[in-house]
Amino acid sequence: MAAASEPHASAFSAAELEFLAEDEMIEIVPNLRMDTLNFISGDFGPFRPQIATQVPLWLAVALKKRGKCTIRAPEWMSVDKLAQVLESERDSEKFQPLPFHYVEISRLLFDHAREDIPDIYMVRSLIEDIKDVRFHKIGTGLEIISKERTYALRLKNLSAMEANIVRPFITRALETFYKLSSSEMIQDSDHVPNRQAQATNRGPRRQLKDR
């Protein structure tokens, strides 16, 4: 894990994010007959030829490398779905809902199951365009908080990679804003006793004459 003390370090490396993404479930079509596999993370199977089943992405990749299955790309990786997401990203200031690990999942499938992804070149291009649009939104948002004082920030539908990139900057910015606010509050509190002292040091009060 990246060192937290490094000023520009992200919370996780790209390899660590990919490792976390490998626990996401995905559908495969096995071409072998095999009993249930028992792991600490759960039981998967049994496997029967040409009968689709759900397994973690790491297991799907392992079986794919051995020629034991084909991997079905998730529904969100279809050209139609991605084109809709891209259009919505461009038309809205909000981030569109995508799988938290959409970047890592797509990269793993591009690397290990290219032949199982319909229209792979168009899918890859759409995902890159979506990433570019979302990064532009992130950059715009960071410019805003760098100019305005704020104490909390809500970014809905960020992916793991996107959150990992902006987390160090936002954390430092919010800490700075908090420290500035705290110092100003201390200065204001220091002025209160000074004003009281000024009020008490105006000299002796004049005695009123009896009428």
Image: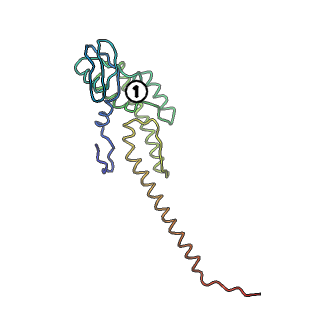
Percent position of residue 65, x then y: 23, 22
Does 142 sit left or right of 3 as displayed? Answer: right
Write the residue at 49% across / 62% down: 184
Write the residue at 45% across / 28% down: 86
Q: Is the residue 208 above or below the residue 193 in the image?
A: below
Does 208 sit left or right of 52 as displayed? Answer: right
Amino acid type indicated by mark 1: Leu
Q: Quadrant of residue 56?
A: top left
Q: Is the residue 6 above or below the residue 131 in the image?
A: below
Q: Quadrant of the N terminus?
A: top left
Q: Nearer the viewer, residue 48 or 62?
A: 48
Label 1's element?
helix
Q: Is the residue 70 above or below the residue 17 in the image?
A: above
Q: Quadrant of the C terminus?
A: bottom right
Q: Quadrant of residue 52?
A: top left
Q: Quadrant of residue 200?
A: bottom right
Return the residue at label 1.
Answer: 126
Percent position of residue 139, x then y: 43, 42
Percent position of residue 79, x then y: 41, 21
